[in-house]
Amino acid sequence: MLTQSQLKAFCAQALRRASAAQGVLEAEVYASDNAYRAARLCYSSHIPCNGLEEPKSVDFGGYSVRVAVGTGKGLRVGVAYESGFDLAGVDAVVSRASAVAVEDKEFQCLPKRDWEADKGLPASGRPYPAVSEKELVASGWRVIDAVLGRLTGSKDLARTALSRTNGWSGLGIIVSGDVSVRHDRAALASTALPEAVSDESFNCRAIATVMIESLDAKGSGFEITDDVAKVGAEAGADAAASALASARGEEMPSGRYPVVLGRFAVKDLMENLVLPSVDATAFYAGVSAFMGKAGKRVAVPALSIYDDSAGTGPQSPKGASGRGFAYKAALTDEGLPVGRTDLVTKGVLTGLLASDYETRRLLASPKSKQNLGLAPERFREGLVPRNGFRVGDMGRRCYDTLPAPMPTNTVVQGSPASRTSDLVKKIGDGVYIGRIWYTYAVNGLPAGDFSSTVVADSHIVKNGRIVKALKPNSVRINENIRTVLNGIVAFGKATLPVQGWYTGFVLYTPEIAVKSMRLDRVCAGMSE
Amino acid sequence: MRNTDLLDSVARHRTNLLSLARRFTRGDVRFADIRVEAMDGRSASAENGMPKVAGSKRHLSVGIRVLAGSSGARSPGYWGAILGPGETARIEKRAAEGLAVAAERARHNAKAKAASRGRFKELGAALVSTELAATEVHRDTVPARYKIDPAQVSEAQAASVAAEATKLALAADKKVVYAYLDLLTFRNRRLYLSSEGADIDQSFAVTQASAAAVARGKDGVQIIGDAIGHQRGWEMIEEGVTDDPLMPIPTLESFVKNLAREAAELSDCPQCPGSGGKEAVIVTDPHYNTLLVHEIIGHPSELDRALKMETGYAGRSWFLQDAKRSQLGKPIASGKVSAFSDATLPGLGHYRYDDEGTKARRVWIVKDGVLNELMSGRQTAAALGLRSNGSYFVTSGAMVGIIRMNNTVFAGGGDDPGRLISEVDRGYYLVGHKTPSIAESRENFRITARKVYEITNGRLGRLYRNGGMMASSKSYLMSVDGVGRDFRMITISSCGKGLPMQLKRMANGGPTMRGRGILTGAD
């Protein structure tokens, strides 16, 4: 990987050529170098397997040139991408960017930064070291060993294994998930900025799913850290413990139930329904679940949600907190400072995830008043471009996309905060839903309807206590996100980081108790 | 380097890369393969009649797999990189570096596997040496099919077409308040070279348009998105596809206008009330069945999922409990239902060889209601003592292959589609797929439709929006009592699987079908 200094130097030199090209009024060069490492967990006791299936890497690097050119017809904007860092090729890329320039009437200018006002804010991010081959492989096996160690240490499971013809292997133990490391370095030079800036993101996570198929048991574990040498054991042990706790689950009838949503479940609702609805692009297109609700109530007054990668992160007993947020970004991919954006404050929609381009066009669009529900200038504090990132697959910050609003670290908070046992007590007779899957806005985001399957870490609650496990995959949630947000009755104490399967951003979520959700019994598992 | 040179240049390295893979298998290295892909494409997007961005994307990618380590614990290691077009001359050097890194990973992996096997005696027994099922070794060169070379399309032309299309969508109905279009056309060339001697050079041309329309009606907004795509050149945008009877594609103009009109029509329709949790007779059209077969037949018949390798991500399969207990050979659908996956058909999922050199063939997943065969690659097939049926696919040369659908469909039947509706006293007709929510092993589903028509006394009645079907996969399939003869394949522009997630284009489809499920409405 190139260092931040090398990337900055490349951008500065490329910018000199771009800005000198004929007809170019404004120019921007963005370069990124990404190293992605992953070890996939594929252990199954009843099917021959490798245990660790894919120790692998994907390295990407390249740059984009964006230019605004003046023509007789007005301002045109164009962008061209190139993999690799060949300075000799820059002139051709600049020519391509000029040649493909289009008349986007909503483009006003490249992102600008008030350098004086930003004095003291970082112009580069913290550097991180590369990961060795041995560390990568060892981290994956650490998860598997932790799971198998925890399971074989269970006396109850040992007794069950003894009673089976095929012993331990017949239990149908599965360890799935990954340890993955995303390491991005990026730099940007622009005629709108006085000097080149750079940033670095590093994120190592272990996600483990453990099943004991013969007992209908499934549990999850998650870790996020900067330290590849240590990651894995905790996620494995947590997933195994959760699987053991969810063994021999039972089904339940369809109906409306009070629920406690675990943090993986809250993550899914945020990732698939709430965050896409607090995105400036969604308001521009008119497809948010909160159309016309800017400055108005969208949730119970106890709920607040904010996005931030500049602060220190919420207090929590473990994970990356205390050392700053897990998603590392000192600057956006537009070269602008990151910071806290309050999205929902005490139940009121107070801000949107925004890039520079989306902010400017939302402020200028004649449809914004209708879409936001108030004149955009009256929502100016909620429209600050702190989230313009160029995000590609694996959540990497990459040169071959344009900046768009993306979350970084989104924190869900509520008060007053209670212990898990108190949340369970509060709902009386209901369900603790730990992990859900395939949560989609089935009738489109504006309608707010969603459907999702309860897949793991879930329990039936009676008289304020967890009494038995809920069989994985036996219940489908059919609900509306607005009903959920307005039906929250209590929050958990710990706000912990979790991450999705394929996203780069991190959600810090507490458990949440909801007054009532529609649960439908569905057929579960394998056909016999 | 000119754009077309990029695709040509990789082929010059074919012989040396083959030799590199063959030479690398010595000592504890049992197998090595190298994938190289060059891609050259144009893209453009537009909103509300305005061009937003147009550009070209070209890259070169290299992916390596090595099986190495002590016998009894042999393990895989991988390496991948996206390179710049300027690095074409360095492909062989980078591939050699990649082989060394992948082998190092494989050896560390083998050592750790052996250690875990010793540590967990009974549970460690499942950790075995990696095997690949035997496959025929092919040498072949396969050209792409196109009339207008995507690499010769100008970005300005693509931008102008995209902007014009969104203008047409906006003009289709005054209720349409937002229109979006994304165009992509590219050619790619894939080399596959293995230590066993496989030497395959396949080229593809792909063109695709994805659109969305938002309409504001009396009672809120309605958003509809869809895509058209085929393995053709830019001509697909200009003319549609009329010479493929299995996968006809409308012109771009007709596609966006229809999408916009439908959004407008639906924005004034009542919300679907649902069937109150009770089963109803439901007739589904080919577009709806495209997503249905994708989710409840296609995905669970991918053998990596069935072997639990995707448990933490895309999920398992309701077809297979373990190596000995499965639904194979058992009825999982009514005798009217058959389904297959066939990469040899000329749809969006077409290829002649998969990404580990196995020749593609038709895989009959379901034959007359009985589960017959699952889609596999060499490693997954070996786990069950089978031969690969050519379903191993990567979405970029730098990625690790996984088992993927290609052209995966419900087979056509013999029933008149009109009669499947006219025979129904009371039921519903679902037109067009919208959004899925699927159970982890694909054993049940809720999939929404773009349009829901009431059927009363054999006639279509009121039109609803925001409706769909919810059912157990097996009970729905067993309930199918009518399969139309109006078979067609339809574009699925993006399906995610794997880690890192690989987004694949494919064709799914089927005919009109009639079965039973719960009609869902607005929540």
Image (cartoon, rainbow, N blue to C red):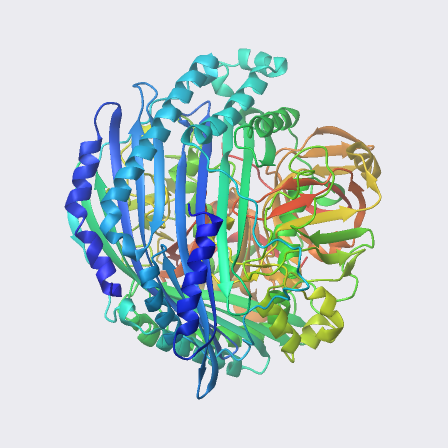
Q: Nearer the viewer, residue A76 or A467?
A: A76
Vertical placement of B424 versus A122: above or below?
A: below
Residue A48 seen anywhere in this rendered image of the structure: no
Across and down, in percent, residue A79 comes to 43, 68
* Quarter of the image with the N terminus of chain A in it: top left
Outermost bottom residue? A72
Q: Nearer the viewer, residue B261 or B231?
A: B231
Across and down, in percent, residue A520 comes to 66, 45
Q: Nearer the viewer, residue A71 or B11?
A: A71
Vertical placement of B62 versus A139: above or below?
A: below
Quadrant housing residue B357:
top left
Q: Indicate left or right for B317 with B345 as reference.
A: right
Across and down, in percent, residue B392 comes to 32, 43
Residue A226 seen anywhere in this rendered image of the structure: yes
Across and down, in percent, residue A526 comes to 50, 34
Q: Residue at the spot x=37%, y=23% of the render?
A: B110
Q: Residue at the spot x=41%, y=63% of the render?
A: A14
Q: Residue at the spot x=34%, y=68% of the render?
A: A91
Report the number of discs.
0
